[in-house]
Amino acid sequence: METAMNVHAALGAHRLVPVVVVDDAGAADGLAGALVAGGLPVAEVTFRTAAAEASIRVMAARGDVLVGAGTVLTVDQVDRAVAAGASYVVSPGLSRDVVERCLEHGVAVLPGAVTATEVQAALELGVSTVKFFPAGTSGGAKAIAALAAPFGGVRFVPTGGIGPANLHEYLALPCVHAVGGSWMVPRDLVSAGEFDKVAALVAEAVALTAGKEVLV
Ligand code: 3PG
């Protein structure tokens, strides 16, 4: 497992976190290959399907993809994700139990926070990188800029409703560490095993981040 510091450095270097929904773990290796081929060896595998845990195991075992678990809602899912090899855990909201279990494991955790109260709760738990979700309907980049003003050291990973057309609005903010999204890993293409098409979408997304790395 990567250290939390290494995980944050890698996410900040890539600037993008592909959010994937895998319906069948049989697609996990091909998906990982597409991410590597496209130049973005990072994935947030969401616990929205029964295949998540097995998919994380397959992808993490390759050793060439930074694999995290997404949509983690329970302590049990934290344990399963870490046992499967996840290097980081992402939650849509802020659960004290989930965060504390991640800290016990020493795994990087990005809880969701879209209000000042939620950001403060994250800080009280020792977490300063949060997911801003759902970004588009929570006010978008303008809302993040306003929310960041009182929280100098907080870094945001906006996700939800972001795509090639508005990615730049988020990447332009110094407080945005990386941006999450599913547009470069469409569920139907992954399920259909169309990994060349996924790799092409990933490469297009990477091209949009050129020159926008952040240093941790
Ligand atoms: C997530 O879980 O982070 C979102 O569902 C991804 O949002 P998107 O599909 O709008 O990119």
Image: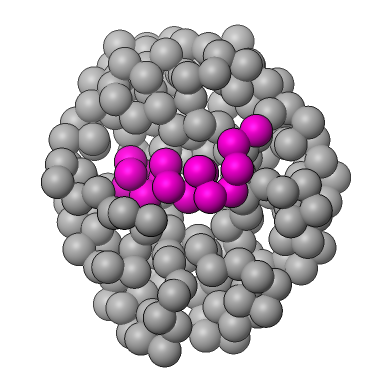
Q: Residue at x 53, y 38 (%)?
A: 44
Q: Residue at x 56, y 14 (%)?
A: 62
Quadrant that contains the N terminus: top right
**Left or right: residue 68 compared with residue 214:** right
> From where the camera sits, is residue 152 visible?
yes
Furthest residue to the bottom? 150
Q: Quadrant of residue 174?
A: bottom left
**Left or right: residue 146 compared with residue 44:** left
Q: Looking at the image, what colour scheme do you see? A: one colour
Q: Nearer the viewer, residue 58 or 22?
A: 58
User: Does the stretch in magenta take in 3?
Assistant: yes
Q: Position of residue 21 (x, y in %)?
A: 54, 33
Q: Nearer the viewer, residue 96 or 93?
A: 96
Q: Main secondary structure of the magenta part?
A: helix
Q: Position of residue 200 (x, y in %)?
A: 24, 21
- On screen, residue 38 above or below 143: above
Quadrant that contains the C terminus: bottom left
- On screen, residue 62 above or below 139: above
- Magenta-colored span: 1-16
Q: Position of residue 27 (x, y in %)?
A: 54, 13
- On screen, residue 29 above or below 169: above
Q: Residue at x 48, y 25 (%)?
A: 65
Q: Position of residue 179 (x, y in %)?
A: 36, 52
Q: Residue at x 50, y 74 (%)?
A: 114
Furthest residue to the right? 76
User: Does the stretch in magenta take in 117?
Assistant: no
Q: How many marks?
A: 0
> From where the camera sits, is residue 179 visible?
no
Q: Nearer the viewer, residue 29 or 10?
A: 10
- On screen, residue 29 above or below 181: above
